[in-house]
Amino acid sequence: MLTMFAILNSYFPLCSVSDCTEALADTNEEKGIFLVHPDRGKHAVRLFCETTQTGDWTIIQARIDGGITFARGWDDYKTGFGEPDEEFWLGNENLHHLTTQDNYILHIDMWDLSNTYYYAEYDFFKVDEESTNYRLHIDGYRGNATDAMRYSNFMPFSTMDKDNDVSSTHCAKFYTAGWWYKHCHYSNLNGRYTVGVVWFNHDLDEWVQMRRSIMKIKIVNNTTAPGSGAG
Ligand SMILES: [Ca+2]
């Protein structure tokens, strides 16, 4: 058994790596694409990992230039699409496996059409399993973008071919994207590029249209996760 493990490990040096922190530590790289196994071996996923002064980050979403369409159905959003270092959606299944193996912070960088920078960070970010339609849990906002995503808290995910929102309309179909729509949204970072990639700024009381967005997560250790049953 030991021998077999050694052989497997020589073929797949990152086989036992379950997140970006371990991948980066294994290779001493500052950033790059790594093959990791969030749930210890059942799934392999390519992650773009980056270490910064604020920690080791995993990119989960990127809108950069409208190079690929985000008008996709359930299966695409489930498995993910795009390239980890280009336009990208990590995939709801991967999001679920990652965010349930530890406690994660969600950080969102956004630049509007005039290149003004906004960020929103959530101390708690978790995506439930598919049987809940990848229900979202976020809490503990800070940033300069105002807390638009809280509106989506406890919502299941919807796509153009799956209406899980609480609206009488089909939000995902209307906005041609996948998101945790409610009735319908105050944030829509998977929306149509660039007209629908928006974040509602409560301070400005207006929609801000984004040219670029990056969503990334990192493990927070030794923190107490807030209760997730409030919804
Ligand atoms: Ca509906």
Image (spheres, grey):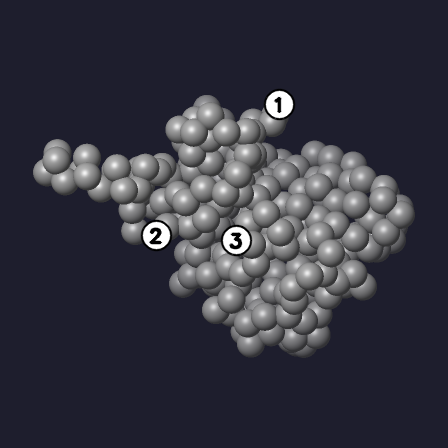
Foreground of the two, 171 or 30: 30
Q: Residue 43 carries which label?
A: 2
Q: Mark 2 falls on what kind of element?
A: loop
Tell me where residue 4 appears, x and y as whole percent. 14, 40
Q: Which quadrant holds the N terminus?
A: top left
Q: Look at label 3 and name its amino acid.
A: Leu
Q: How crowded is mark 2: few (under 14 residues within 10 Å), some or many (20 or more)?
A: some
- Residue drawn where x is 32% and y is 37% of the image: 13
The residue that disc 1 covers is 53
Badge 1 element: loop
Q: Which of marks 3 and 2 is nearer the N terminus?
A: 2
**Snapshot quadrant of residue 36:** top left
**Disc 1 residue: CB within 8 Å of ligand 1:** no
Q: In this view, does 39 lie above or below 142?
A: below
Give whichever of 171, 110 is nearer the camera.
Answer: 110
The residue under label 2 is which amino acid type? His
Q: Quick check: marks 3 and 2 in contact, CB under 8 Å?
A: no
Check disc 1: other Cα within 10 Å, few if <14, some if 14-19, many if 20+: few
- Disc 2, disc 1: CB below 8 Å? no
Q: What element carries label 3?
A: loop
User: Is there any visible trace of residue 155 in the rendered image?
Assistant: no
Q: What's under tag 1, amino acid-wise?
A: Gln
Residue 37: x and y in percent read 36, 45
Which residue lies under the disc numbered 3? Answer: 90
- Residue 120 in the figure: left or right of residue 225: right
